[in-house]
Amino acid sequence: MNKQSLRLYFIMGSTNTNKDPEAVLKEAVQGGITCFQFREKGEGARTGEEKKRLAVQLQKLCHKSGIPFIVNDDVDLALDIQADGIHVGQEDVPLAEVKKRCPGTMIIGVSAKTREEAEKAVQDGADYLGVGPMFGTTTKEDAEAPIGPQAIRHLRQEGITIPMVGIGGIDEINAGEVIEAGADGVSVISAISRAVDGTQAAASLKKAVHG
């Protein structure tokens, strides 16, 4: 897993924006995102063939730009469209099962917030960890209380060496703190998906994480 590709990790589904998701992703790519996760969840989310059609559209865009395309939680879809990777949360399909079903070339990310969760993910063969929420966020209805960038610093001190991205409430103002704490990158949803100008938003975030 190339750590550089996690630097500016954009996550989005159709429910995260009022604009056309393809147009938003195009802007984000122009602004300099390095990785994309298709997360089609929440009220009004697309399902079945409609979900797959949107995934394929966005995947084509990513491939044209050499950006890894990760699918959130849907192993069947990830395998069907030959996505570059899959990301699972603690409540999703167990990592051991995901590893069994997915080819060895597929990037596998896992959400973790405690040392126990992180160590288990490493043991089970995760390629990277998504750690958070870093700050307060309104994107996820069931979001837990923020754990702050110090959580990443603690995981590093506990000997967790695999790539990590911070997620949750990150914007251009606080992104630098997450990197300073030991993260390899930041994951954002609304900082780009809800921005008036996605290209500008992504470019500002890119500047913040490379600052």
Image (cartoon, rainbow, N blue to C red):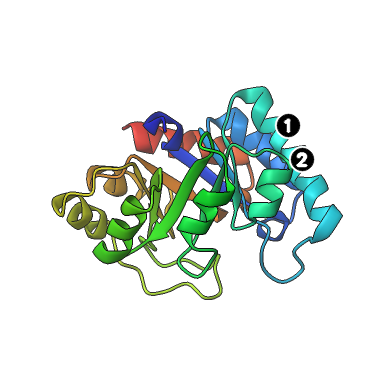
Closest to the observer, 187 or 125: 125
10 Å crowding of disc 1: few (<14), some (14-19), many (20+):
few
Q: As displayed, is residue 160 above or below residue 73?
A: above
- Give the number of callouts: 2
Across and down, in percent, residue 208 comes to: 37, 38
Q: As displayed, is residue 60 above or below residue 137?
A: above
10 Å crowding of disc 2: few (<14), some (14-19), many (20+):
some
Across and down, in percent, residue 114 comes to: 28, 65
Quarter occupied by the C terminus = top left
Across and down, in percent, residue 161 comes to: 24, 43
Across and down, in percent, residue 56 comes to: 76, 40
Quarter occupied by the N terminus = top left
The amino acid beneath tag 1 is: Lys
Q: As displayed, is residue 131 above or below residue 60?
A: below
Whether label 2 touches label 1, CB < 8 Å: yes
Task: Give the residue number, with chain letter if any, for mark 1.
Answer: 60
In the image, is 196 to the left or to the right of 181? right
Note whether residue 192 is visible. no
Closest to the observer, 9 or 157: 157
Task: Give the residue number, with chain letter if any, for mark 2.
Answer: 56
Q: Secondary structure at mark 1?
A: helix
